Every structure is written in structure tokens, then in C-alpha cells.
Amino acid sequence: MYVTTDRALPAATDPVRALRDHVEAVDALYRFGLGQDLRDRDLFASAFAPDAELDFRPAAARWGGEPPLMRGRDAIVDTILDLFEDRVETTHTVADPRVAVDGGTARLTALVEAQHLLRGHEVHALLKNRYDVGLVRDGDRWVMSRVRIDNVWFTGDPTAVFG
């Protein structure tokens, strides 16, 4: 489920290619976070494969939420950005990324802290989530094909933010 190898890069690989793959894989998650924070549809969409799947259900279950499994890049982008439009401000911070590459696919594990503030900042939800991400190559970059988000802890009122 999570990347738990005992080293960052395999010993028997081209180190430049391995570092590039690592950076590009993590960049897909950075595009995911910053695209939401800036409400930049193109940047946000660039994080996903066309047939991507995003599963926020494990995280939402911590506070009794029951969101749908999101399928398809356009549906993911529309669902998330439309839900927050003119209502919620976000900031995302990515930490502890681990990447394992296997040819044209990769896995990424990371901690993501996501602050959600309702306009006016009177209500918030701060989430610390563990991400389990499957990626595929898209030319010379990586895009996320599967994202599973599991909540480690939260503070505030997620039901006010997510409905």
C-alpha cells in the first residue's frame, strides 16, 4: 500500500533518470495541491491521467462523510474545484514523499496537510492525510492514475467544509 523501501533510489539504475523520475512523480502531487490552492484548473488537471481515480472516502469516513469515488480527470477537477468555488480557501503542504518506479508506472506515498477555510475564516478544517498514489508516465512527466487519501488526524469542522 505505501512505499516502504529502505532507500530512495535503486542501486542498479541510471541515477539521473531515477532522480528525474522521483522529482517528476512528486511534482504531480505538488500540481494537485497548488492547482487547488490557486483554483488553476489547468494546473490541477495536469496532475491527473485522463482515466484517473480519486478516493477520498477513507479520509471522509473519519468524520462520517460519504463522498463518491471520483473517476476521470474532468470529473475530479470539476467536483473538487466547483465544491470549493467562492466558498473555501485551501493551502496544501506535501511532506515525506517516497517514490518507487517500475518501468512506466510508479507509486508515491506522502503526507499532505490540507487547511480548508470557509470564506470569512470563521470555520476551518485542518487535515493531515496519508496519500497512496499510483502514477503513469505522460511523456517526460508523471501523472496520477489512482489517488487514495486516508486521514491521520483532523481539527476543526470538516462537515462544514465538505458538506
Image: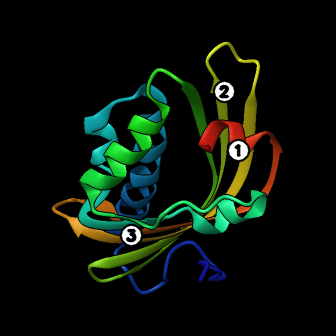
Q: Which mark is residue 159?
A: 1
Q: In the image as oriented, which residue stretches furthest toward the top?
A: 120
Residue located at (72% from left, 47% from top): 127
* Disc 3 target residue: 18
Q: In the image as oriented, which residue stretches furthest toward the left?
A: 139
Q: What residue type is disc 2 on? A: Leu
In this view, the residue in front, 3 or 74, is: 74
Q: Badge 3, how many Cα within 10 Å: few under 14, some, many 20+?
A: some
User: Which corner quadrant of the image does residue 35 belong to?
Assistant: top left
| Residue 141 located left or right of residue 35 | left
* Disc 2 target residue: 117
Quadrant where the C terminus lies? top right
Residue located at (27% from left, 62% from top): 72
Q: Position of residue 154 (x, y in %)?
A: 80, 49
Quadrant where the N terminus lies? bottom right
Q: What residue type is disc 1 on? A: Thr
| Residue 39 located left or right of residue 161 | left
